[in-house]
Amino acid sequence: MIVGALLLFIIVYLKGISGSISSNSLSDSMSSISSAIQSLKLIPPCYYIAMVLCLYVCFFSIINTRKHKDIKTTILAGLSGINVLLLIINFKTISTIQSLLSLDLSDVFSGKISSGLVSDAYNILKNPEETVNSLILALGFGAVILAYSIYLFVTYYKKEQQTYETISLNSLKKTNAANKKDTLSFTRKQKTIGCLVIGLLLAMGIGYYIWDDYLNYTNIDLAKNINLSYKGISGEAYIDDVTNNVEYDKSNKEIADFVNSIEYNYSKDENLENGDSVTVTTVYNKDTADKLKLHVTSASKVIKVENLIHRFKEAKEVPKDTIALIKDKALTYLKNEYTNDYYETYRFSYCGTYLVKYNKKDSLVAVFKDNHTSKDYYDTVTTSTDYYYYEITNVNSDLNNETFGNYSTYKSMLKDNEDEYIKRDDDIASSLHNINSEITEDVIEVD
């Protein structure tokens, strides 16, 4: 009866506080709230006392059920057991409320509140209706125990039975006088069963909180689908954008907001070249993740930089398709630019393709030799040998037939250091140092 009375008292007490606040005028609202806070501090201790007493009621009811095999006591044991579970389930809510009530207002306004308490309060306020209903169920169940206890008291008082010591204090005294051993001592088996039941109830309550705090989480991988895009060529590239298709319940707005708030840190984000490894680390709000019960399984990812457009370092890196492309473009240009007629005859032959390297760029150059014949008005024939070059500037691995239009080309005849046109194959390589005003670092024959 004490358990039910305590729980019923809490409900009535809360109702009285609520009515007191609502009946006050707006001018008295602050003092009413302050008074209500002080009054509410009485609730948690009453709750704890009721929970402990309920454990004892359950224990003694089970002992008496084992001893006397009475259905009424069995029902009381079942009701009190259920009430213990309900009270344990709401224990954390009451504990959080007690912690909030014990806060000083100065701590609240200055933000000196532990993140754990903020998280617990958030979980309560996140589903206030569910929290209130759970508390009402636990407290209201006390009224059921109270009513049933009164029923048992009246029933066994009238029948003057001496069996249920925990129901009537007078019965306990009479039984003590008649058979002290029966009432004050229990068999080892009875004690074991009682302890096991209490232990089971406590284990169920503790297990629930362990599950809720440490196991009731949704796994989320924040890094698995991270992809990077780059701008620039290898050695000069930088991270242009990051995409991350995180897998989660897209219908959950709170998780969606959490995912959209993620930022990224990079171990290196500029002067990237093929073969570099970039560690991408997600930066997220851990408190928010805890509130949403998200367990982050992976927060970083190592990405290997590859497929960047790159300069050619040596002859073997130049694709055969690229060599064939420049040969075709050069020969087409020469045949269109220098057409044969009665007076002029051009006979072009391919001499080779060269990679001309500068400090910050490269050129690909195709060289053709022209065994030229010309006639004058009197049909006098003159022969000469000239060397023509066709240059594609700023060449790199992106050069192909589709991208050719993005590159600049230059065409002319090869000259030596004395600004004279060369006449021998042996002078081709040295003359390629003179096709640009920029200092040439190297000339590499690729074909």
Image: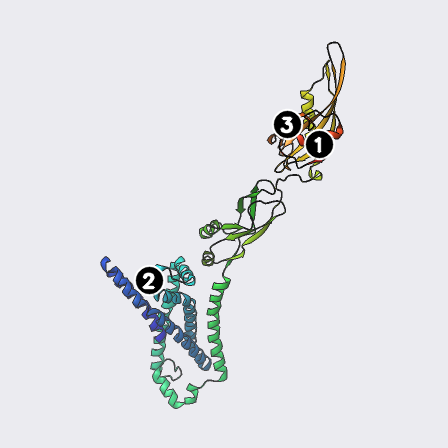
Whichever of labels 2 and 3 marks the residue nearer the N terminus, that label is 2
Whichever of labels 1 and 2 marks the residue nearer the N terminus, that label is 2
Look at the numbered disc 2 and give the secondary structure of its residue.
helix
Whichever of labels 3 and 1 marks the residue nearer the N terminus, that label is 3
Look at the numbered disc 3 and give the secondary structure of its residue.
strand
Is disc 3 surrounded by few (<14), some (14 to 19) or many (20+) residues within 10 Å?
A: few
Q: Nearer the viewer, mark 3 or mark 1?
A: 1
Q: Amino acid at mark 1?
A: Ser
Q: Residue at x 71, y 32 (%)?
A: 430
The one of 290 and 443 positioned closer to us in this rendering: 443
Q: Amino acid at mark 2?
A: Ser
Quarter residue 419 falls in: top right
| Distance Cα–Cα, label 3 vs label 1 | 18 Å
Q: Could you tell whether 217 is left or right of 306 in the image? A: left
Quarter residue 288 falls in: bottom left
Q: Which residue is mark 2?
A: 106
Q: Which residue is mark 3?
A: 410
Q: Nearer the viewer, mark 1 or mark 2?
A: 1
**CB within 8 Å, label 1 to label 2:** no
Q: Amino acid at mark 3?
A: Tyr
Q: Which residue is mark 1?
A: 430
| Distance Cα–Cα, label 2 vs label 3 | 77 Å
Is disc 2 surrounded by few (<14), some (14 to 19) or many (20+) residues within 10 Å?
A: few
